Image (spheres, rainbow, N blue to C red):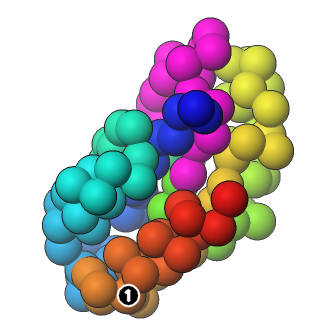
Amino acid sequence: MAKKGLLLCVCQGTCPSFQEMDIFEVGNTLRREKLIDYFAIHPQLCARDGDIFLETLLKGDSTDKLYVAACDPLMQTKMFRDALEKAGFDPKNHVGIDIRNKNTEQAIEALKELLTEE
Ligand code: SF4
């Protein structure tokens, strides 16, 4: 079975777009329902150490699909391109989802929909 990872990135936790949700509850709900194989929160994936995190995480074959709940998916594609390439991770297996301005329930619902559609 394909291994699915979920990362949440919330602009260091200071951006107002993410203030309405409990990010731990979002991840815990999806873990409890076994919709993902692993879950992590990163404060700023688009920073230099975010690149290092992505490269380190995705090197090898441990993840088949990486879901990133954060900002605009198109922006994510551009920002993570180099790190995914360095890790040898096919960008088609990165699935971005915008969870800005959602509350906990809305973020969970949007992610559940995405995670169960394949
Ligand atoms: S990747 Fe997106 S959500 Fe994460 S810190 Fe950068 S702009 Fe914010």
Say which quadrant the C terminus sits in: bottom right
Residue at position x 55%, y 65% from top? 116
Q: Is residue 8 above or below residue 47?
A: below
The residue sitting at the front extreme is 1
Q: Is residue 7 visible?
A: no
Q: Residues within 10 Å of mark 1 (few under 14, many from 20)?
A: some
Q: Is mark 1 within 8 Å of ligand 1?
A: no
What residue is drawn where x is 47% and y is 40%?
5
User: What is the x, y in percent for residue 79?
Assistant: 69, 49
Mark count: 1
In this view, the residue in front, 34 or 45, is 34
Left or right relative to 40: residue 87:
right
* 3 is higher (above) or lower (below) than 46: above
Residue on which the image places disc 1: 106
Residue 79 falls left or right of residue 66: right
Q: Amino acid at mark 1?
A: Gln
Which residues fall within the magenta stretch? 49-67
- Image quadrant assignment for residue 10: bottom left
